Image (cartoon, grey):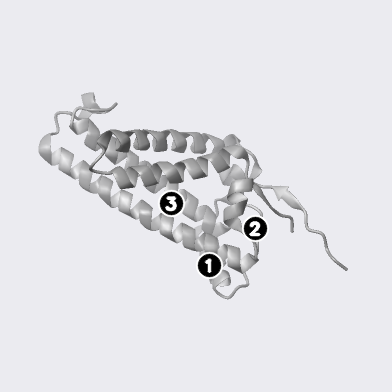
Amino acid sequence: MNSITKDIKVWDPLVRVFHWSLALAFTIAFISEDDHMTLHSYAGYTIIGLLLTRLIWGFIGTTHARFSDFVRSPHEALNYLKETATFRAKRYLGHNPAGGLMIIALLLSLLLTTLTGLGAYGVEGGGPLANLLSGMGHFGKEAFEEVHEVFANFSLFLVVIHVAGVILGSISHGENLIRAMFTGTKQAD
């Protein structure tokens, strides 16, 4: 007897647009870093806007978009990773505990990246922090730029881990998680 699988909606349009827009904006910001500062700045402002939108949506959004649905303790995330290594991890319709922890890490790292970028720009006399930071001089600019670069590289590192986790999760549970982030649907349990 053939069992019929049913697709159900998991990721709402806002989550999907946020995800791919953030990926694009981060890529543009990372690539344009020193050579195209106007483009780099616009990408950074886009990231800040996306992060603020996602923060709000994390509290008022649809079921699987809410932080309460996927934020778990580091202990739960570690247990999930151990079970994944042996291909015995439970399948989650929304984000699994490790994925939830990764989302929080990425959001925080990107927030710190953008804030330090705003700081570096402000020291130069540009952007919304110019009045507050423009008197900091060369040392202040260098400090903001160094911290900005550290967080940008750390964010890239997290992205690589995230993509590896998505691939591993797709293999482990026999589902295409990348497709799900485009279509918004996953197979019901």
Mark 1 residue type:
Leu
- Residue 186: x %, y % from top left: 68, 53
Q: Amino acid at mark 3?
A: Ala
Quadrant of residue 65 in the image? top right
Query: CA gap, disc 3 to disc 2?
Result: 19 Å
Are there few (<14), some (14-19), or many (20+) residues within 10 Å of tag 1? some
Q: Which residue is mark 3?
A: 105
> Mark 1 = which residue?
81
Q: Residue extending furthest bottom?
A: 86
Which structural element holds mark 1? helix
Element under disc 2: loop
Which residue is denoted by mark 2 in the rendering?
92
| Residue that sits furthest to the left in the current view | 138
Closer to us: 33 or 77: 33
Q: Residue at x 53, y 60 (%)?
A: 166
Q: Residue 137's spot in the image, x, y percent?
A: 11, 34
User: For the C terminus, which image quadrant?
Assistant: bottom right
Q: Earlier in the sequence, mark 3 or mark 1?
A: 1
Q: Is residue 123 above or below residue 72?
A: above
Disc 3, disc 1: CB below 8 Å? no
* Mark found first going from the N terminus, 2 or 1: 1
Give 23 or 108, whichever is nearer the viewer.
Answer: 23
The picture places residue 30, in percent across and down from the top left corner, at 33, 47
Q: Residues within 10 Å of mark 2 (few under 14, many from 20)?
A: few
Q: Are marks 3 and 2 in contact (CB under 8 Å)?
A: no
